Amino acid sequence: MLPLNSPTPAFAAVAPARAADEIARQIRELVASGQIKPGDRLPSERDLAQRLHVSRNTLREALRALEHAGMIEMRKGAAGGAFVLPGDSGAIVTGLKDLYHLGAITPQQLTDARIWLSDVVVRVACQRATEEDFEQFEANVAASAQAQRAGDFGTRQRLNREFHVLLARATRNPIMASMMEALMEVMGEFIGRIGPSDNPFVLPSRRRLLRHLRARDEKAAVAEIVTSLTRLQDKYLALADRQRAQAASTRDATAAALAAPTAKRVRQVPGGSGRR
């Protein structure tokens, strides 16, 4: 709940047209100005609807939009309500996933972005990574090796995403970490669609990368990750192309099979005007 001694946030009545958008905008601005802080609970639904001069349904629409964007969390129970969340990458992940699902991002663009972002991440991590970071890197690689030996594709994929996010966090820049987390979430969906593949060169490359990072050899570290990710890109895009070609072939065969009986019936219809 908002602290008792804090000033009441200046909510204003909103016009009926697109009222839910206006409510969401006001709440965002109050958070941005510091009048509402992460962890604060918004006023009760009844109180807030009265202050804004809107119906509860309109208010709920606005709160759902803010929850979907990762700005608030709706909690149930006596101590429940709408709570402002600390910032995270949830909204970025959701937005990037939506673009990918709508076809606005191609596999080529997705894998290019991973290479380019990783280039910058490794350059900065080479300067800023701490011993604690290296312990996390090495634990991740060890767990990945175990998952590979067990043939556990799901765990291997999860640890792969985690490794790249750990690298980004080592930059000590939350923007880089959020961007990498969002990118790797979508990469996970892309890789899941094309199916598991054996990439025995990845773990040896990771170990070489860690040696270069420990040595603070930026040039060698960047070359290592770019080479490895480019090799993966070529493989993934080839698999995706093959999958699309197979799907197109199946669609064509199905369409031909469905059209065949119709064509046969047309040929069997008696013709000629002399039979009238």
Image (cartoon, grey):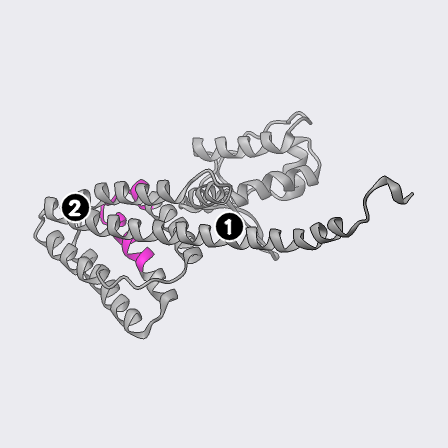
Which secondary structure type mostly characterizes the magenta part of the structure?
A: helix
Tag 2 secondary structure: helix
**Residue 157, position as x, y percentages in the image:** 35, 61
Q: How many marks?
A: 2
The quadrant in which the C terminus is found is top right
Circles 1, 2 touching at the beta carbon (< 8 Å)? no
Task: Please tell me which residue is depicted at 27% across the width and 42% down the height of the picture.
Answer: 117
Of residue 180 and residue 266, the one placed in the foreground of this image is 266
Task: Please tell me which residue is depicted at 15% across the width and 46% down the height of the picture.
Answer: 223
Does the magenta segment cover residue 168?
yes
Q: What stretch is highlighted in magenta?
A: 160-177
Of label 1 and label 2, which has the lower sequence position? 2
> Is residue 94 visible in the rendered structure shown here?
yes
> Is residue 174 visible in the rendered structure shown here?
no
Which residue position holds label 2?
A: 222
> Within 10 angstroms of label 2, few (less than 14), some, or many (20 or more) residues?
many
**Residue 168, position as x, y percentages in the image:** 27, 48
Quadrant housing residue 162:
bottom left
Which residue position holds label 1?
A: 248
Tag 1 secondary structure: helix
**Residue 218, position as x, y percentages in the image:** 12, 45
**Amino acid type assigned to the residue bearing label 2 in the image:** Val
Task: Please tell me which residue is depicted at 39% across the width and 45% down the height of the picture.
Answer: 107
